[in-house]
Image (tube, rainbow, N blue to C red):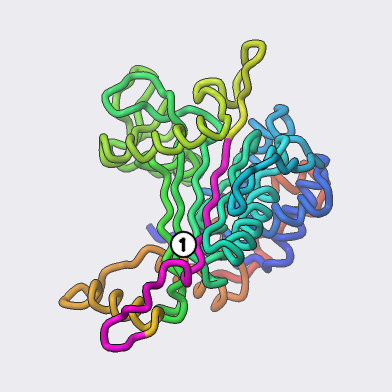
């Protein structure tokens, strides 16, 4: 059965999300950053990390639980390396921290060719793909990973969840070649917990072999999910472990303590890592047929997706299609179940509820 989408004006969505964050004590800039991020996620069809998920995360692990501190100030820590910045986020809103960190990594890459920012004492930034997508649109190669707010993934061959969903996100400057940036972005679990929440909201099952119940048995019922499993068996597990190792080197907490009560002297916060590469820093200039770097990039993509592969879907293409659908509809697309969730948010922060029948459909 197909879903009916309701077209919500972007400014109306932005205003509600901003009001919700202001109501929870965030500054005007933080609230605007949060709404900007949610606008971006919904524009690109990221239903697992939209405003509903963002505020759900804040309620359970953020400002209402002490995991995030409205108005916190980022502290730049000493670094002996010119191209590296090290920050203590002091549990500042993750979206604000991530936007600022990516801008700083770009600034460093403009000067050094490569820039990186490591962030300790962070609160989850949600959809990493959005940050690298923006950087790629600006002409850079960008990467980020983070540790998740909660350990809810069982290691390959294990029994107890000791890993987060631990996403990796890459963005490549392919707009000239394709019309949009390639964005390779995924959680290292078979599905993200946001997908479980989405499917629960919509009354739909999970795919097979994505989650286990409290007894450790596979389940497709989103209401019975106790833990997730890595995608690709040992391969997804290895990618998830990378995030934990990077975070451990930054200063991260033990995975099973994040967002939970902790012993004295321990910590329970996430870590972020950002890296930006200026394309000129990679170029040998020795391109065949006297091609430029961008022409060579386009030629390589044409070769990979030629030879009968023309109908393959590229990473970032679904997001580009969703953005095109958003533009065509003239607003952000939400289901009736999502509208109901937004009205719960409106009730919380004293804003007018949305009238489902006032919206066009697409």
Using the image, determine if residue 189 lies above or below residue 100. Answer: above
Quadrant placement of the N terminus: bottom left
Which residue appears farthest toward the left when viewing the image? 307
194 or 186, which lies in front?
Answer: 186
| Residue at which label 1 appears | 171
Identified at 46% across, 76% down, the residue is 175
Using the image, determine if residue 89 lies above or below residue 214. Answer: below
Identified at 38% across, 19% down, the residue is 160
- Residue 178 at x, y = what percent? 40, 78
240 or 212, which lies in front?
Answer: 240
Identified at 52% across, 36% down, the residue is 148
Left or right: 68 in relation to 220: right
Left or right: 294 in relation to 76: left
Left or right: 292 in relation to 268: left
Q: Can the viewer see residue 4?
A: no
Identified at 40% across, 58% down, the residue is 184
287 or 97, which lies in front?
Answer: 287
**Splitting the image into 4 quarters, where does residue 220 fall?**
top left
* 276 part of magenta stretch: yes
Which residue appears farthest toward the front when viewing the image? 80
**Splitting the image into 4 quarters, where does residue 60 fall?**
top right
Q: What are the residue bounds of the magenta stretch?
A: 271-291
């Amino acid at each position: 059965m197909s879903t009916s989408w309701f077209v919500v004006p972007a400014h109306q969505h932005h205003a509600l999300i901003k009001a919700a964050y202001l109501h929870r004590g965030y500054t005007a800039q933080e609230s605007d950053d949060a709404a900007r991020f949610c606008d971006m996620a919904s524009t690109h069809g990221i239903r697992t990390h939209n405003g509903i998920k963002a505020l759900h995360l804040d309620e359970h692990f953020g400002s209402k639980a002490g995991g995030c501190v409205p108005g916190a100030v980022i502290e730049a820590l000493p670094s002996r390396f010119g191209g590296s910045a090290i920050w203590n986020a002091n549990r500042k809103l993750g979206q604000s921290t991530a936007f600022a960190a990516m801008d700083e990594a770009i600034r460093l890459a403009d000067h050094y060719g490569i820039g990186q920012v490591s962030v300790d004492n962070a609160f989850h930034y949600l959809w990493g793909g959005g940050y690298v997508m923006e950087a790629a649109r600006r002409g850079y190669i960008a990467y980020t990973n983070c540790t998740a707010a909660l350990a809810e993934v069982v290691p390959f061959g294990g029994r107890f969840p000791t890993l987060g969903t631990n996403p990796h996100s890459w963005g490549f400057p392919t707009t000239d070649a394709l019309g949009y940036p390639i964005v390779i972005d995924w959680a290292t679990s078979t599905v993200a917990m946001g997908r479980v929440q989405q499917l629960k909201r919509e009354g739909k099952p999970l795919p097979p072999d994505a989650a286990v119940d409290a007894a450790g048995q596979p389940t497709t019922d989103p209401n019975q999910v106790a833990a997730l499993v890595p995608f690709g068996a040992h391969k997804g597990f290895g990618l998830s472990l990378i995030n934990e190792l990077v975070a451990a080197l930054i200063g991260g907490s033990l995975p099973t303590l994040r967002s939970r009560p902790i012993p004295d002297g321990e910590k329970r916060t996430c870590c972020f890592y950002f890296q930006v590469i200026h394309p000129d820093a990679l170029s040998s200039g020795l391109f065949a047929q006297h091609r430029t770097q961008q022409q060579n990039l386009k030629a390589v993509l044409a070769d990979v997706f030629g030879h009968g592969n023309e109908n393959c879907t590229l990473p970032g293409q679904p997001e580009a299609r969703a953005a095109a659908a958003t533009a065509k509809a003239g607003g952000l697309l939400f289901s009736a179940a999502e509208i109901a969730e937004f009205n719960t948010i409106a009730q919380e922060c004293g804003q007018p509820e949305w009238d489902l029948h006032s919206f066009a459909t697409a």
